[in-house]
Image: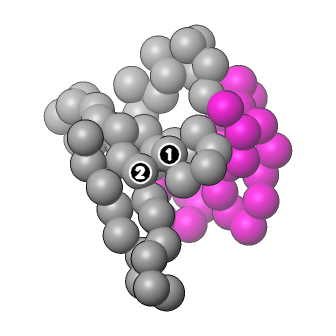
Amino acid sequence: MTYPHTFASPMCGERMWGEIEGNLTDLAVKAAMSTPGTYQDGDGLFLKIDKRGGAYWLLRIQRDGKRHDVLP
């Protein structure tokens, strides 16, 4: 397992510093639904899958030097 709950997928982009860089494809999202974790889509957008199979998108931004996670 890589840095907190970030999993590699052959359908995603390249790995950088333990995280996945690149855009998630429809096939990658469907595959991710079976494995809990955090999947990076690029430009601060993340797909989070919980242990019960629930999923949500999260936008991570930085404002005044502090990280903020924005939920839709």
Picture layout, residue 1 above or below residue 53: below
Mark 2 and mark 1: Cα distance apart in space: 5 Å
Residue 12 location, quadrant: top right
Q: Quadrant of the N terminus?
A: bottom right
Badge 1 density bin: few <14, some 14–19, many ≥20, Cα 10 Å: some
Q: Amino acid at mark 2?
A: Leu
SS category of the residue bearing label 2: strand
- Per the rendered image, the range of residues in magenta is 1-23
Quick check: can you spot residue 31?
no
Q: Which residue is mark 2?
A: 59
Quick check: can you spot residue 72?
yes
Q: Nearer the viewer, residue 46 or 32?
A: 46
3 left or right, relative to 30: right
64 left or right, relative to 10: left
Residue 70 location, quadrant: bottom left
Asked if labels 1 and 2 touch by Cβ distance under 8 angstroms, the answer is: yes
Residue 35 point in image, percent of width and height: 41, 34
Q: Quadrant of the C terminus?
A: top left
Residue drawn at x 47%, y 45% as measured from the top left:
46
Residue drawn at x 41%, y 51% as measured from the top left:
59
Q: Is residue 7 magenta?
A: yes
SS category of the residue bearing label 1: strand
For this orientation, the residue located farthest to the front is 64
Q: Looking at the image, what colour scheme do you see?
A: one colour
Badge 2 density bin: few <14, some 14–19, many ≥20, Cα 10 Å: some
Residue 25 point in image, percent of width and height: 62, 19
Q: Which residue is mark 1?
A: 45
Residue 17 point in image, percent of width and height: 74, 67
Q: Amino acid at mark 1?
A: Leu
